Image: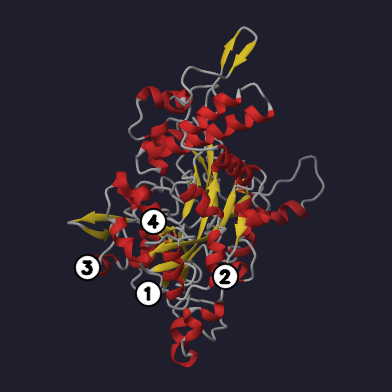
């Protein structure tokens, strides 16, 4: 057992209100410089929808992530030989149209316009050509357009849904959609790191954050193609790639990342988990239907004395183990099993998990009475307005059972709370539902507390970073200064 620590995350999708505060917080802190205009390290998509960049989930086109060939893991986008042929032009890259043409406004015309009868307006100007342009796309262009024939109908996750289910998803007045915030997943098996011919991308040993060394990057862009979530971007001004850094300078000082801190819906949770690094490759090679469970089994019980011993032997500090024991991520992913990884079939083993959203509550109306009770306790989960298959394509590598389990438990918790506070459901019925959902009153209370009444300290259990013990800090700075970034003060620029 090779125990390591990783900062991991959970996004509770039922709580996301699509306000985009997270995206703006990140944009203002990290990507407001030249060349980063179009970059959204955090973006929020409407699902069903095509997302940003357009149809990023289409790996037939983008060739991101890993595949298993002859029993071995192989990058879809590149390999030793293919690197040579594709080094100046990678055919699987998104183009500017797949993102959008960045623009600004002609503010001077607005502010300096002479007094007149008409309201002056600021025309959009392209930040690429400087010329006036018509805006045709943006980072959340399909916001709230669930059901639309241009965006929602082209969602890749509709694959395998019957025509009836597809029609139901966009039926007028019954339309259903949810928000899907996305950041870099800081994967356990990151294809961006594996693809980089310059070795510029690396995963920090002490906390698993995936970073990109601006001094080493030569702008080959293999990472952009290889990341199946399209979370690495190319800066045309510096000639380097850039990506989400999980606000590591904030984490190192005990603060939550900016998008987590500012999240209005309080959907975001962050904590340490311990995992077994020895089993990463074997896990990533599993067949699709086993991937979620195998990925979950990589996460180790931080209370287990054997795990604690192995962690200590690997140099993990006791304060970090203590933090892993209090991690909200461990509870959602491993104890309660209600948070699932996005598109695990790309085999990068993402370390950001999502609690899948419940559909709107189904009810029967008899005259003036609305009845929520039905014969089957979980009838509306299999017939939910968001077809299970759709959620399974997104969160379960097609395995519906995983999503069904998470939704049943969430529903049972709601009914238990309803029995307690509203009283129109009997406690006996709520107890039966909890049992059928593999839960208990104690667990339901804990899920309710961490979902609804959580404080800042409950949501973000940030481990002490112990930079003094990090690998770079133990190396001789004079020997390793070029590889580890000691002493650089100049910003990145082309040709370095
Ligand atoms: S999400 Fe993409 S950029 Fe982030 S670690 Fe995974 S493969 Fe790399
Ligand atoms: S700030 Fe939070 S609630 Fe608002 S869109 Fe972002 S993740 Fe959702």
Query: Which residue is drawn at the image coordinates 48% and 46% (left, top)?
Result: 339
Place of residue 33 in the rendered image (x, y in percent of width and height, measured from the top left) = 59, 66
Place of residue 395 in the rendered image (x, y in percent of width and height, measured from the top left) = 42, 43
Residue at label 1?
Answer: 199
Badge 2 crowding class, 10 Å Cα cut-off, few under 14, some 14 to 19, many 20 or more, is few
Q: Nearer the viewer, residue 420 or 131?
A: 420
The image quadrant where one finds the C terminus is bottom left
Does residue 485 appear to the left or right of 62 in the view shown? Answer: right
Ranked by sequence position, the earlier of labels 1 and 3 is 3
Q: Are marks 3 and 2 in contact (CB under 8 Å)?
A: no
Residue at label 3?
Answer: 81
Ranked by sequence position, the earlier of labels 4 and 1 is 1
Find residue 368 and report its image quarter.
top right
Total numbered labels:
4
Does residue 338 appear to the left or right of 190 in the view shown? Answer: right
Find numbered disc 3 in the image and state the secondary structure of the residue it sits on.
helix
Disc assigned to residue 349: 4
Q: Nearer the viewer, residue 90 or 267?
A: 267
Place of residue 451 in the rendered image (x, y in percent of width and height, measured from the top left) = 61, 44
Disc assigned to residue 38: none
Disc assigned to residue 319: 2
Q: Nearer the viewer, residue 455 or 395?
A: 455
Ranked by sequence position, the earlier of labels 3 and 2 is 3
Does residue 66 appear to the left or right of 45 in the view shown? Answer: left
Q: Nearer the viewer, residue 139 or 401?
A: 401
| C-alpha gap between disc 1 and disc 3 | 17 Å
Badge 3 crowding class, 10 Å Cα cut-off, few under 14, some 14 to 19, many 20 or more, is few
Place of residue 425 in the rendered image (x, y in percent of width and height, measured from the top left) = 61, 23
Ranked by sequence position, the earlier of labels 3 and 4 is 3
């Amino acid at each position: 057992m090779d125990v390591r620590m990783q900062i991991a995350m959970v996004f509770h999708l039922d709580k996301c209100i699509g306000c985009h505060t997270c995206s703006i917080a990140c944009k203002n802190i990290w990507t407001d410089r030249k060349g980063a205009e179009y970059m959204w390290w955090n973006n929020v998509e409407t699902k069903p929808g095509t997302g940003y960049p357009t149809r990023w989930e289409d790996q037939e086109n983008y060739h991101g992530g890993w595949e298993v060939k002859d029993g071995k893991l192989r990058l879809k986008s590149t390999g030793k030989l293919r690197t040579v042929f594709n080094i100046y032009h990678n055919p699987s890259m998104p183009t500017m149209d797949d993102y959008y043409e960045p623009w600004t406004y002609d503010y001077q015309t607005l502010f300096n316009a002479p007094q007149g009868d008409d309201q002056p307006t600021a025309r959009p100007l392209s930040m690429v050509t400087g010329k006036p342009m018509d805006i045709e796309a943006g980072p959340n262009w399909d916001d709230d357009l669930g059901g639309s024939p241009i965006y929602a109908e082209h969602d890749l996750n509709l694959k395998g849904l019957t025509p009836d289910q597809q029609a139901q998803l966009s039926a007028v007045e019954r339309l259903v959609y949810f928000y899907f915030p996305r950041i870099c997943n800081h994967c356990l098996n990151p294809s961006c790191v594996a693809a980089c011919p310059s070795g510029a991308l690396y995963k920090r040993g002490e906390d698993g954050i995936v970073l990109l060394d601006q001094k080493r990057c030569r702008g080959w862009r293999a990472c952009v193609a290889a990341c199946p979530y399209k979370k690495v971007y190319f800066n045309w001004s510096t000639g380097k790639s850039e990506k989400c850094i999980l606000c590591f300078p904030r984490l190192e000082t005990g603060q939550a990342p900016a998008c987590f801190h500012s999240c209005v819906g309080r959907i975001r949770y962050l904590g340490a988990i311990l995992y077994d690094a020895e089993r990463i490759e074997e896990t990533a090679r599993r067949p699709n239907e086993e991937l979620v469970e195998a990925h979950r089994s990589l996460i180790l019980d931080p209370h287990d004395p054997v795990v604690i011993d192995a962690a200590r032997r690997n140099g993990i500090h006791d304060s970090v183990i203590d933090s892993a024991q209090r991690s909200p991520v461990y509870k959602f992913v491993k104890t309660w099993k209600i948070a699932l990884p996005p598109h695990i079939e790309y085999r990068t083993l993402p370390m950001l998990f999502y609690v899948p959203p419940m559909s709107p509550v189904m009810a029967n109306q008899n005259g003036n009475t609305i009845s929520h009770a039905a014969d089957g306790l979980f009838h509306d989960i299999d017939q939910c307005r968001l077809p299970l298959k759709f959620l399974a394509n997104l969160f379960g590598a097609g395995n519906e059972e995983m999503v069904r389990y998470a939704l049943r438990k969430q529903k049972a918790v709601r009914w238990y709370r309803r029995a307690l506070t509203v009283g129109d459901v009997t406690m006996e019925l709520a107890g039966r539902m909890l049992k059928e959902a593999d839960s208990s009153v104690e667990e339901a209370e804990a899920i309710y507390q961490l979902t609804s009444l959580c404080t800042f300290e409950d949501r973000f259990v940030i481990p002490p970073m112990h930079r003094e013990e990090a690998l770079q800090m133990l190396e001789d700075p004079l020997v390793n200064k070029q590889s580890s970034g000691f002493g650089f003060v100049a910003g990145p620029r082309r040709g370095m």
